[in-house]
Amino acid sequence: ITLHEVRAASDAAFAAYDAYMADIRQKGEEMIAAARREGRRIIVLVGRPYHVDPEINHGIDKLIAGFGAAVVTEDSLAQHMEKAPTGVLNQWTYHARLYAAARYITAQKDMNLVQLVSFGCGVDAITTDEVREILEDNGKIYTQIKIDEITNLGAVRIRLRSLFAAIDQQHTLESTKEV
């Protein structure tokens, strides 16, 4: 393989990646706009890239959607997010996106975050603390689902139902304060 072929392949790969990410962001914007028009909740489902695999995430995205919420990922919000200092060493791109998404969500009344974690991945212990702090310091509810401990979706369903009830209660309290 020549250097020219490697460069051409690399350029094509980056162009395909950029087009893929543009599609994700556009679809995310469409889903967010539709959810806002329809008055539905928006859940930003975050996790490691391999958590997207339905065999790993147990279909949690579909379970959340079954509650009537729009489900988007932090990738679909990237164009709105800015990097900012964190309380932890932030040396990975995924972590930077995760923390930026958490900060972005705190400014959106209709968005909440659910983080999928695998405690087989030791770094998740660090990201969960930082994401929790960002959200809770700004009045948002932090929800974590440990996907490597799931034996059935009943417990996840209860956790999500509790999240939605807590969000409703929070909105009721905010509405009462405004009146």
Image (cartoon, grey):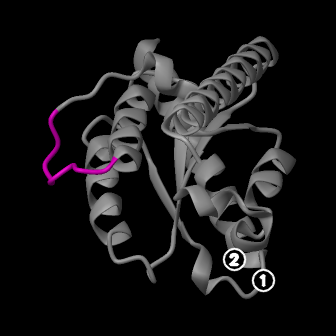
Residue occupying the point 73% across, 63% down: 53
- How busy is the neighbourhood of tag 1: few (under 14 within 10 Å), some, or many (20 plus)? few
Dominant secondary structure of the magenta stretch?
Answer: loop
Look at mark 1 in the image and give the residue it sits on.
152
Q: Position of residue 162 (x, y in %)?
A: 62, 59
Look at mark 2 in the image and give the residue it sits on.
155
Q: Which of 78 and 105 lies nearest the eye of the viewer?
A: 78
Distance from disc 1 to disc 2, alpha carbons, whole Å, reads 7 Å
SS assignment at label 2: helix
Q: Which of 71 and 41 lies nearest the eye of the viewer?
A: 71
Residue occupying the point 45% across, 83% down: 120
- Please say if 37 is above or below 54: above
- How busy is the neighbourhood of tag 2: few (under 14 within 10 Å), some, or many (20 plus)? few
Residue occupying the point 74% across, 60% down: 60
Q: Which residues are magenta?
A: 85-92
Query: What amino acid type should be assigned to the residue bearing mark 2?
Result: Ala
Q: Position of residue 79 (x, y in %)?
A: 48, 18
- Kindly check if marks 1 and 2 are in contact, taking CB atoms under 8 A apart as contact: yes
Query: What amino acid type should be assigned to the residue bearing mark 1?
Result: Asn
Q: Which of 92 and 151 lies nearest the eye of the viewer?
A: 92
